[in-house]
Image: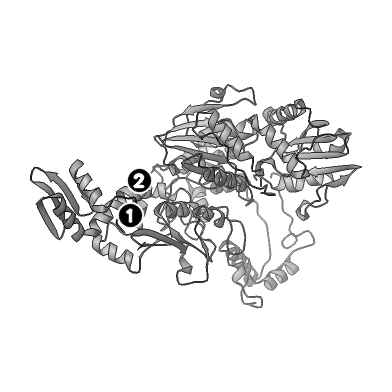
Amino acid sequence: MAGARADPTPADALREAAAADGVDFDGLRAARDDDGFRVAVPEASYDGLSAAEFDDAVERHRAYAENWLFWHQHAPQNPAEWAFLRWVEHADDLSVPERHDRLRDGGLDREWGQLAIEAHIEDGRRRYELRHVDDTALDDLTTYTDPYEARRLRKTDDDGDYRPLSTAPTLAHGWAFVDLDPDALVRAAEGFYPATVANWHREREGDLDVTHWHETVSRQTGIYGVVQTWDRGEGHDHVNRVAEACCVDSQCLKRREWDYDAETPLDVARGDGVFPCREPCSLVIATARKWTRLESEQSRTYEFDLTPSEKEQIETIIDAVADGRIDEIREADTSDGANRYRARYLRAKLFDDEGNLCGVPTDGDDR
Amino acid sequence: MTEALLLVAHGSHLNPRSSAPAQDHADTIRASGAFDEVREAYWKEEPSLRNALRTVTADEVYVVPLFISEGYFTEQVIPRELRLEFDAADWNSDGTSADFATCSPSDVDKTVHYCGPVGTHDAMTDVIVRRAETVTGDPDVGAGVGLAVVGHGTKRNENSAKAVEYHADRVRDRDRFAEVRALFMDEAPEVDDVTDHFESEDIVVVPLFIADGYHTQEDIPEDMGLTDDGREGYAVPSRVDGHDIWYAGAIGTEPLMADVILERTADAGADTGTDAPTTGETTTMPADGD
């Protein structure tokens, strides 16, 4: 490849860097002192080299020089993107020769939410592929090369329904981004999961700026200002319920790092996601606005007569809706309380013409 | 010193077309090479405004709100959520004259040039005229034709109407159209009575909305009598009360909007080169907020 491109050869670039500030990167050390050039890798070291001897030594350990050149000349230099690309190829876990062997033969993989990322070296250059994690073994996928198309693919799920939350575990299948360069990989990953790379990096560096629930709702104005009234300094059970409803792994792939406030953790699992959630999102706030209004109601006592099975069926229906299980219920599976025929029978039996359960009107003058 | 463009739009939890104009114009501007980086951020979608500036590598960021009028969103919500030290007085605007303010956000080490919304830039007047040309298929449209510029209107913010009236006045001053009126969805004079406001047989109706959605595709066409159910579409032109109504759909989807965005950044000192982006064919119907 040397000479085929205008880029400097690894040896030329390394010699220049060694002569300037010296190099110490991924096990490769190179410098120049009064005796000449020095080069060291974990397997060997050389002192007092002429420029030509330096080039020979570098050639013997070419993977180290190519690796150094890639990370300093070809990879995006934005620290978060750089760290993400290093993570993709397990740079902290594998030696340079091992990494380069794997990149040239079979590639290296990572999962980022529902994205399967594969890195490989092709014609001396790093290239990346991106697919849905469920699609890694498929070969009849629609291929894309423009990473910005990910922003459009993220908008709908497999049924064509709108996905207002990019990090919901409902990413559509059937596509593959191929032949991406390093910058394009970052753009595509960010297209699917916006801002995740930056916040993941901040967290790794120990400076993720978490904004907790109370601070977030206190900031709201306009139609969302009402959510502030839901926090009354009487505990945080309402926020536990919000997190359980919206923020667990079955609903969002971000790992919740915010709590009620800095001193009051929520009692809900944070999730196992690789990228963090640093504050309640707009969907949580918009939904909380609805709950704030609903939760301002006083409870009443209603009396209904239900058979044990009818009570259980109502519980099953609520579970089925809450768990998104409706589409899985077979048409004729009447053993499932949330089956459509079962629900229709229950409605026919228990609802009056106004839709009141057991004919008991909803007493809601104070709503 | 690299420069980035951040387009800020409302977005929606319900309407997938809401973010389409931001994405489409971002793609056009990226292809033009005017900025090293072009990103979008949303009030209702992701990246959220709170996480937006950290998605940018550049030290200098030009933030352009894809909003029609100056007011609550552009003066309060967006700067607050971007964590800018900004006061609406920094724009020194009369309601349609915001230019830009240079601020330091608190969560990233960058300089942000916070621009006024696209909707109140003078170049929007050209987009309205272009929209009339596009919908009628007549590059010389004007003589004997009435033009209605339609805004949302709201009792809560007088600037909402100001932006619409401002551009209607500017189009009128060009003496190109036989009649020009500013009409509104939610306040008088109302778009429902569009034919009462014009003598011309042909009336071009351009809604000043960023995205196509419920308001532009259902409310307004139904209110004007173009269709009983906007979801089933409407004819262009549609015959109503002896007039032909040429209804254009949301102006924010017009490719020429990309030029307005670049004008905003140029006014704020961005080095975008001299050539305006090559805007492609007009797309129909991309969305508005819930």
Residue A80 horizontal/vertical position (percent): 37, 47
Q: Quadrant of the C terminus of chain A?
A: top right
Q: Chain of mark 1?
A: A
Badge 1 marks a residue whose secondary structure is: helix
Q: Quadrant of residue B255?
A: top right
Badge 2 marks a residue whose secondary structure is: loop
Say yes or no: labels 1 and 2 on the same chain.
Answer: yes
Question: What's the distance in space between the residues labelled 1 and 2, CA to CA?
Answer: 12 Å
Number of numbered discs visible in the structure rendering: 2
What residue is shown with label 2? A77
Residue B72 horizontal/vertical position (percent): 61, 32
Circle nearer the N terminus (1, 2): 2
Q: Chain of mark 2?
A: A
Vertical placement of A89 versus A226: above or below? below
Residue, x 23% and y 59% (percent of image)?
A62
Residue A113 horizontal/vertical position (percent): 45, 59
Q: Nearer the viewer, residue B283 or B113?
A: B283
Left or right: A65, with A248 as reference point: left
Q: Quadrant of the N terminus of chain A?
A: bottom left
What residue is shown with label 1? A86
Q: Residue furthest front?
A: A3
Residue B182 horizontal/vertical position (percent): 77, 32
Residue, x 46% and y 65% (percent of image)?
A133
Q: Which mark is residue B209?
A: none
- Residue type at mark 2 is Gln
Left or right: A234, with A31 as reference point: right
Left or right: B127, with A143 as reference point: right
- Residue type at mark 1 is Arg
Camera sees residue A4 = yes
Q: Nearer the viewer, residue B65 or B201?
A: B201
Q: Are marks 1 and 2 in contact (CB under 8 Å)?
A: no
Camera sees residue A295 = no
